[in-house]
Image (cartoon, helix red, strand yellow):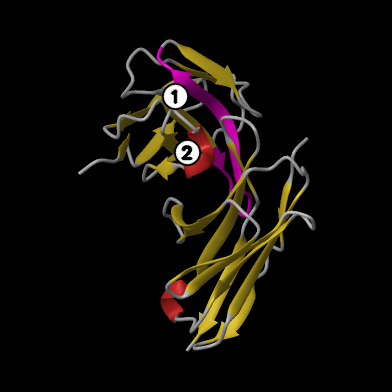
Amino acid sequence: QKEVEQNSGPLSVPEGAIASLNCTYSDRGSQSFFWYRQYSGKSPELIMSIYSNGDKEDGRFTAQLNKASQYVSLLIRDSQPSDSATYLCAVNWYGNKLVFGAGTILRVKS
Amino acid sequence: DGGITQSPKYLFRKEGQNVTLSCEQNLNHDAMYWYRQDPGQGLRLIYYSQIVNDFQKGDIAEGYSVSREKKESFPLTVTSAQKNPTAFYLCASSPGQGGPRYGYTFGSGTRLTVV
């Protein structure tokens, strides 16, 4: 059974701080890694994808991948109250579907 | 604009009743998926389809059925055999080649409640 694990939170950070969200996965054969943001009552929205070891930056978001440690993270710099949401980690193996973690609730306090 | 349309947004089901959730996409994606999300839980895969007239069971297919007669459409029927259907249902799609390597696009979801 392929698994994706996330700390459920909530993770509380002050406005302007860096929020760090973590995800581990069970299978070394994983190919593609995604972070989705989901606001309460809404559907998930893709915010970052990463395919190779290292960092990938997009605006205030940085995704980090370490395949040896089976670990992927998302950093949000200059956190804003509008970043308050649930963040879902998703992983694709050599297949045709994604496996999702249960999500981490982020709360940014102004 | 391209996207995925789910309808209805809210649906109420009586005990013993079958209901059908609609999912239509105009992204020209080959693959389509149905997920269920319960409060505080992640997304669980119900069914998926990679090509017209073909679909596979996901992790929690019991009590559900699907069809894929057109590339654009992937309706989900929640049958009376599904004993706990109250949940948020999400439809998604991805390009055929490379599939989920590029992530999914999600519809806006249908919230189903048993009354």
Tell whether B38 sits left or right of B50: right
Q: Position of residue B93 (x, y in %)?
A: 42, 35
| Residue corresponding to mark 2 | B89
Tell whether B64 sits left or right of B73: right
Q: Position of residue B13 (x, y in %)?
A: 44, 30
Q: Main secondary structure of the magenta part?
A: strand
Which residue is painted at 33% across and 23% down in the image? Answer: B73
Find numbered disc 1 in the image and state the secondary structure of the residue it sits on: strand
Say which chain tag 1 marks: B
User: Upstream in the sequence, badge 1 or badge 2?
Assistant: 1
Tell whether B29 sits left or right of B87: left
Which residue is painted at 48% across and 22% down in the image? Answer: B49
Q: Position of residue A43 (x, y in %)?
A: 43, 50
| Residue corresponding to mark 1 | B76
Say which chain tag 2 marks: B
| Outermost residue, left side | B1
Q: Is residue A79 magenta?
A: no
The part of the chain drawn in magenta is B36-52
Q: Amino acid at mark 2?
A: Tyr
Total count of labels? 2
Task: Choose between B36 and A3: the one closer to the eye.
Answer: A3
Corner quadrant of residue B92: top left
Q: Position of residue B104 (x, y in %)?
A: 46, 42
Mark 1 vs 2: CB contact within 8 A: yes
Circle 2: is it few (<14), some (14-19), or many (20+) Cα within 10 Å?
A: many
Q: Is residue B7 visible?
A: no
Q: Is residue B49 magenta?
A: yes
Q: Amino acid at mark 1?
A: Leu
Task: Choose between B73 and A95: the one closer to the eye.
Answer: A95
Which residue is painted at 40% across and 43% down in the image? Answer: B105
